[in-house]
Image: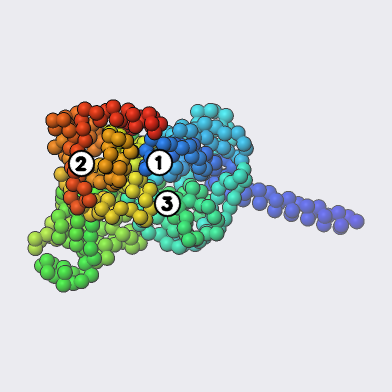
Amino acid sequence: MIKHFALTLLCCLFTLQIAQADKRTRSQQSAAFDSDAALVEIEITKTGYNYQIPWNTSTQQSRKNGIVIADHQILTTADGFSGHTLCRVRKGGIPHQYTATLKWIDYYANIAILDIEDPIFWEGMRPTRLCQQIPQSGELQIIRWRNGRIEERAAEIVRLFVGKSKMSYVHHLTLSASTEMDSTGWAEVVLSGNQIVGLTTSYADDKLSILPAPFITSVLEQKAKGQDVGIGHFDFSIMSGKNPALLASKGMPHTDIGVVVTQVGSRRLAANTLQVGDVLLAINGFEIDNDGKYIDPTYGRLSLYGLATRDNHAGDALPMRIWREQQELTVDYILPRADFTKDLVPERLYDQAPEYLIAGGLLFQPITGPYLNTYGKNRPLLLEYYSHHAELPERNGLVIVSSVIPDPYNRGYESVRQLIVDRINGQIIHSIADISEALAHPQGEFHRLEFMPDQGLKHIVLDAASMEAATQRILKHYNIPSARSE
């Protein structure tokens, strides 16, 4: 009996030790990451726009995840916030929602920081840290809130590379992983062990793209300094230097390194420093091989375009070693800030409604990426050409007559569609504001509209005196709230 009691007691003590050890292990793990105390669910309400009927709007909702990284700082991706009117956050899977404010956002980097004023929200919440170095192989864990419950799925790293941001043309370090978790890409938290390696940004064909923690940290640290300098971008294009005859033709003594610059300033960000025909040999001390790659001391062989965001920011001077006119030179490349508004046709627009102007039933709109996207793959060929291939350095933008709203005033022009405006009353048109100015100065009794070459119609003429009356009649008849965007 005594032996049996002693044996039972020993077993109990051993079980207690195992339980305590397990508790300590879980406590150590939770010290690194506790989903209940750090992970939140975000609901965004925003205004949706119809670029073909630009005065029409709708209300849209989306949900995503966020992670607490500091007191009054919730980190998430910028995706989904453009045009938002309300943002609410849930924690711990409970139904109660807290109103959040957008503290800071960078669409080009795809990073946003939220804050919640209600102190009750922050009770029990514990900030977590992003890892300083991400793995290049192995397994990952994806965690998110969904329908009030924590979901976890495994993922496996596919590769690490320099890719484009989901929200812009900016290049940065990107992690690709395979997973069976569906409907991902909405800022789910990605872990390696207990370390946060990044946030998800997109998902397609069982492949997940991840915004890596080191890039996020670099952007946040720059913002913490109070310097809103923006994200840098290399505004030049290159071609491979693999063909030794190409480099030899430029008089280079060694043809085993370097790429040839083929275009400079296509984004209208920086048309200086480099020249077409330069051979790019090194950037910021990193030698560039014939494929346009450099050896990163942490992550190995990567595209040179990643150097623009590798601990660098807009305004930084990066020394570039080049071969030009039979000699080796070193020039300082001032890293330009990524900015869609500099494009002839802005690829994306954030936090702004579509611009338009109705005059005599003619609907004028600027050509933009969002407008062209309404056509999907069936974009009008001429608009596609002017958007991506036409070189018009003298113009700051392009405006079209996208359609004509029928009225006796514009009889005969009802079929006019997608014509790019060159001049109105002799004034060159770059923007919607230019149209208002030009219409204030008719040519005698008429408004004369001229269109760009290679279009089906060269010009149209409208009566100047009756245009405003026709515009008001059209607005009333078609129940259009305003003749122009606010």
User: Disc 2 to disc 1, how far (Cα)?
Assistant: 27 Å
SS of the residue under disc 1? loop
Residue in the image at 50% along x and 40% along y: 61
Which three-letter amino acid code belongs to the residue tagged 3? Pro
Q: Residue at x 42, y 51 (%)?
A: 212
Q: Earlier in the sequence, mark 2 or mark 1?
A: 1
Q: Residue at x 38, y 29 (%)?
A: 476
Q: Would you name the residue on which mark 3 appears? A: 212
- Residue corresponding to mark 1: 50
Q: Residues within 10 Å of mark 3 (few under 14, many from 20)?
A: many
Q: Which residue is mark 2?
A: 460
Which numbered disc, 3 or 1, marks the residue closer to the eye? 1
Measuring 32% from the left and 50% from the top, which residue is drawn there?
169
The quarter in which the N terminus is drawn is bottom right
Q: Badge 2: few (under 14), some or many (20 or more) residues near its Cα, within 10 Å?
A: some
Q: Earlier in the sequence, mark 2 or mark 3?
A: 3
